[in-house]
Image (cartoon, rainbow, N blue to C red):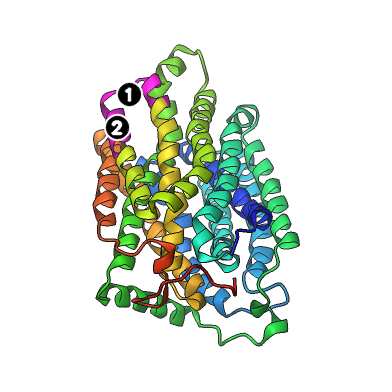
Amino acid sequence: MRLDYKRTFLLGFGFFGVSIIWSVYNSFVPIFLHDYALPYWLIGFIMTFDNIAGIFIQPYIGQLSDHTRTRLGRRLPYILVGAPVAAVFFGLVPLIHQAMGRTPAALALLMGALIIMNIAMAIFRTPVVALMPDITPSPQRSKANGIINLMGGVGTTIAFGMGALFAVSRGLPFWVAALILLGCEGVVLLTIREPRQFTTAAGEAGKAPSFGESLRDLFKTVGDVARAQDKSTLFICLAIFAWFMGYNAIETFWTLYGRNYLFAAEVARGVMTGDAAAAKATGMMIFISGAFLLFALPAGFIATRFGRKPTIMTGLGILTVLWTGVRFFPSLPYVYVTLILSGVAWALININSLPIVADLASDEKIGSYTGLYYLFSLLAASTSPTIVGWLMDLFGMEVMFVFTPAFMLLAFFLMLGVKRSEPRQAVTSLGGAVETAGNADF
């Protein structure tokens, strides 16, 4: 079955909007928090609120959406509910910070807005991602994920370009991102039609799990995976945890690192303001997002030709070497080269990891396994910033360039344990492999 490029491109708008929100969030919220004179470890902990919410909400929503049947389908209703709430409270973040100053009451309100925004994002993030395997045949999922991540890369690149807006007004990047999110999710709602078997017209919904049942099922799945004779699912989940541990260290603190270290001399001389330095550091991330953008589609085709596992391991090896080098050669030319090649390597990894997880699931459990993917990635994202922040308080910000390559190397070795990674090795139930070229029901 051939890939429907037009439909995949339209679905990519969902990831486009989400990517813009998270890129602005990770770039500028730490700057706001730093204004309250918080230590790095606490800033790191607060920046994990989105991931903590995701751990408890996204796996449940993934399973709940598997059992949902409406006229829109099983995934789209969650986008309709979550996206508007997330956009509104994201737009409130800079307003609270600007209007109330640096008081404890302002910090409390800021935390409230961030928490509600993160819960709303968690409500629709897994359904957006699960739509891809819902409507895409197994052999085409790496290509489809490449297109979707290409759209996400465009969103991330645009978001990093908003550093110039931040220098004009601290609120502009947030308000523009919120409007873009609403527009993008609107495109998905208006153009994507889910398979007929997932609508009320095709039949009644199954019994939806309670929150407790969902968590029990999720951790039972983790236990089954751990006990299974074939450990491919376990090893890919552990590898996902490891590489997100490394990635989130850089993502969370890059803007502060740029302001406080890369451009500290310029700020001290009065050549640029602290906000201008933060904007320039954010702008540097265009190199990694732009390289990811250009390599998103090739990464899917490379995996189709050479295999998903070797492609991912190549990306992990590149990241290990590059970020180790930043520790010893922190010059701007080397940093720019590292950012560009890191975008290429991250595409090799990120484009092909979700398709492996999806192909290890039976058709009726794709939402649940998408939740499993997010469980391990969010566990990493929930712990990495706090640990790295604590280490930076002790040893300085450069410690992230030891932390990140160490976890990328760990992920490389964990990938050696993944034995089933290709489309023809998809499963119909846990541990049962079949040879298939796709599913005509998609």
Depicted 333 relative to depicted 283: above or below: above
Residue at left 43%, top 28%? 258
Residue 52, visible in the rendered structure? no
Q: Point out which mark residue 398 bears.
A: 2
50 horizontally vs 71: left or right: left
Residue at left 43%, top 21%? 263
Please, what is the dominant secondary structure of the magenta stretch? Answer: helix
Give how far across and how far down residue 347 sits, in percent.
Answer: 45, 44
- First reached walking from the N terminus: tag 1 or tag 2: 1
Q: Point out which mark residue 330 bears.
A: 1
Q: Quadrant of the C terminus?
A: bottom right
- In this view of the protein, which residue sits in the foreground, 2 or 430? 2
Residue 128, visible in the rendered structure? yes
- In this view of the protein, which residue sits in the foreground, 390 or 159? 159
Viewer-nearest of discs 1 and 2: 1
Q: Mark 1–mark 2 contact, CB under 8 Å?
A: yes
Helix, strand or loop under label 1: loop
Based on the picture, tell me whether residue 300 belongs to the magenta stretch.
no
Amino acid beneath label 1: Pro
Please provide the residue range marked out in magenta: 320-336
How far apart marks 1 and 2 lie (CA) works out to: 9 Å
For disc 1, the neighbor class at 10 Å (few under 14, some 14 to 19, many from 20) is some
> Can you tell which quarter of the image residue 10 is in?
bottom right
Q: Point out which mark residue 174 bears.
A: none
Give how far across and how far down residue 397 sits, in percent.
Answer: 32, 33
